């Protein structure tokens, strides 16, 4: 138990941000040295160092990737695929995959949230698709269908199909999806990564038991958002 707790406290940097962080810190160092050697007064150097250093720390925070393990029962359990806030819990007509009514639960991620995404259920990846589109603000209802997004359709071990949709926002312009068609997937595994503020939608059967409420904060791979019926 002690080892598990220690693992939960570990935080690493996501590999999607490695090159960005290295190149940016190298640029900051070079520019800082130029400023230091170019002016007799040192306030431009210190001002630049404070501003650039603060921005670099914000980017570092954005790319943090905590190591998390779900401790509960995973059968028929749907966990939050992302850190953020619940912005939608409603039934919608889904015309692309299911062609029927679905329960949609949406999580909005601010630029301050962890932006790694986790698989919301155990199962097998049925399909993966990337759809080009607009870049509306991610919390708007039309963002789910009109914005650029990546769809991962998963079949659970019990035979239930669910859809997890990564959505680009007004700032987020790159969606990374690690899911591969016909591969098994599990809670605790990363589904992908979205750069800057964005949103993740999960489409479930309408008889699913909702375990969250509007405005509730979620922790990716930890918060149970729904329970699937047998």
Image (tube, helix red, strand yellow):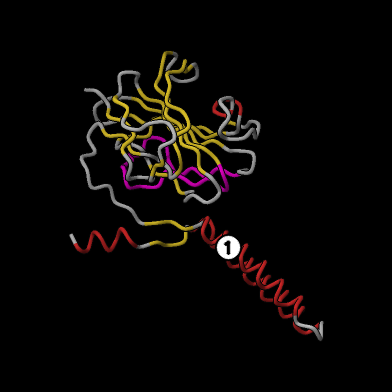
- Quadrant of residue 162 in the image? top left
Q: In this view, does 159 lie to the left or right of 150?
A: left
Vertical arrangement, residue 59 with respect to residue 35, above or below: above
In this view of the protein, can residue 152 be seen by the observer?
no
- Residue 179 included in the magenta stretch of the image: yes
Vertical arrangement, residue 39 with respect to residue 161, above or below: below
- Quadrant of residue 91 in the image? top left
Image point (32%, 27%), residue name: 210
Front in this rendered view, residue 90 or 143: 90
Q: In this view, does 165 lie to the left or right of 69?
A: right
Front in this rendered view, residue 155 or 200: 200
- Residue 156 included in the magenta stretch of the image: no
Residues packed near mark 1 inside 10 Å, few (<14), some (14 to 19) or many (20 plus): few
Vertical arrangement, residue 125 with respect to residue 102, above or below: below
The part of the chain drawn in magenta is 174-197
Return the x and y of residue 26 as percentages of the image width and height: 64, 72
What residue is pinned by disc 1?
19
């Amino acid at each position: 138990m002690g080892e598990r707790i220690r693992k939960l406290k570990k935080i690493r940097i996501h590999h999607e941000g490695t090159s960005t962080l290295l190149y940016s810190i190298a640029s900051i160092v070079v520019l800082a040295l130029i400023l230091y050697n170019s002016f007799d007064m040192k306030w431009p150097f210190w001002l630049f160092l404070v501003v650039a250093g603060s921005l670099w720390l914000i980017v570092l925070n954005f790319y943090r990737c905590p190591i998390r393990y779900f401790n509960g029962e995973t059968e028929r359990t749907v966990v939050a695929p992302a850190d953020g806030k619940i912005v939608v819990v409603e039934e919608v007509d889904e015309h692309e995959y299911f062609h029927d009514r679905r329960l949609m639960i949406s999580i909005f991620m601010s630029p301050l949230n962890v932006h790694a995404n986790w698989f919301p259920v155990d199962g097998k990846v049925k399909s993966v698709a990337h759809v080009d589109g607009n870049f509306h603000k991610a919390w708007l209802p039309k963002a789910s269908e009109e914005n650029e997004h990546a769809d991962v359709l998963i079949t659970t071990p019990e035979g239930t199909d669910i859809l997890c949709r990564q959505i680009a926002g007004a700032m987020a312009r790159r969606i990374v999806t690690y899911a591969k068609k016909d591969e098994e997937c599990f809670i605790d595994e990363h589904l992908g990564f979205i750069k800057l503020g964005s949103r993740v939608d999960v489409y479930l059967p309408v008889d699913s038991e909702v375990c969250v409420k509007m405005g509730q904060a979620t922790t990716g791979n930890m918060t149970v958002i729904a329970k699937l019926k047998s």
